[in-house]
Image (tube, grey):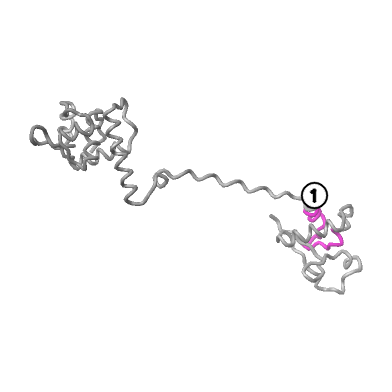
Amino acid sequence: MSELQLSIPTINLLLALVHLRGSGTTTDFKELYGAESVGKGELKEITEHGLVKRHKEGRGYRYKLTDDGRLEARRLLRGARPEKVSVRTARVLWAIANDLSAHLDRIGAEFADVYPAEEPEPPAAPETAVSETEAAIREAYPNLLGPVNEWVPLRHLREHLADIDRDELDKTLTELFGAHEIVLIPESNQKTLTEADREAAVWIGGRYLHLLAIEAR
């Protein structure tokens, strides 16, 4: 069924019947919604489009939603608020809202389940401050590399950064090593170590480490 452009009274009729579980009398409309009768305009629309069936009952009529009428009511509830909403429309919509509330009670849900709060954006991870000593180590490393060797002797690093306090340099090297930011290893051929190499070594994990490597980020 193509999208219909229904009048406000006809919309009221359809939604009122949704609240009445698909069937209601003229008396029901009057008692619940203050509607004295279904006007000629609504009757024409519901007849033309097959939304509601009507038959005589007592002094008034009974109106029943058809399958097309249920589908159209569902479409209306998905759409935007109709213009020129009347007091009667407000009463009908309030009845629908009561139905929704009762349904939430039955299934043990709350409005938070229907209207979940927007997830707050996770805070941006704070940028890790790079100390001056770490920056100096990273800047010195590529300048100290040999033509084929990726390992820099700590002796050469200490000579290049002679203006940095030894304790500060050792502390930074130890922290970077623990954070897996750098690699430190002992010289495999201890016989090649000079006294200056031994003096420049850093003591970590129960052994002296002599060579530095920094992987590209």
* Residue 203 locus on image (x, y percent): 82, 67
Residue under numbered circle 1: 132
Is residue 196 depicted above or below 3 in this figure? below
Picture quadrant of residue 58: top left
Is residue 78 depicted above or below 147 in this figure? above
Amino acid at circle 1: Glu
Instruction: Tell me: 145 left or right of 15.
Output: right
* Residue 167 locus on image (x, y percent): 85, 58
Picture quadrant of residue 53: top left
For the residue labelled by badge 1, is the local secondary structure a helix, a strand or a loop?
helix
- Location of the C terminus (image quadrant): bottom right
Spot the residue most to the front: 31
Q: Which residues are magenta?
A: 136-157
> Does residue 140 belong to the magenta stretch?
yes
45 and 111: which is toward the camera: 111
* Residue 83 locus on image (x, y percent): 32, 26
* Figure label count: 1
* Residue 174 locus on image (x, y percent): 78, 61
Q: Write the residue at 28% across / 30% down.
A: 89
3 and 62: which is toward the camera: 62
> Does residue 2 belong to the magenta stretch?
no
- Location of the N terminus (image quadrant): top left
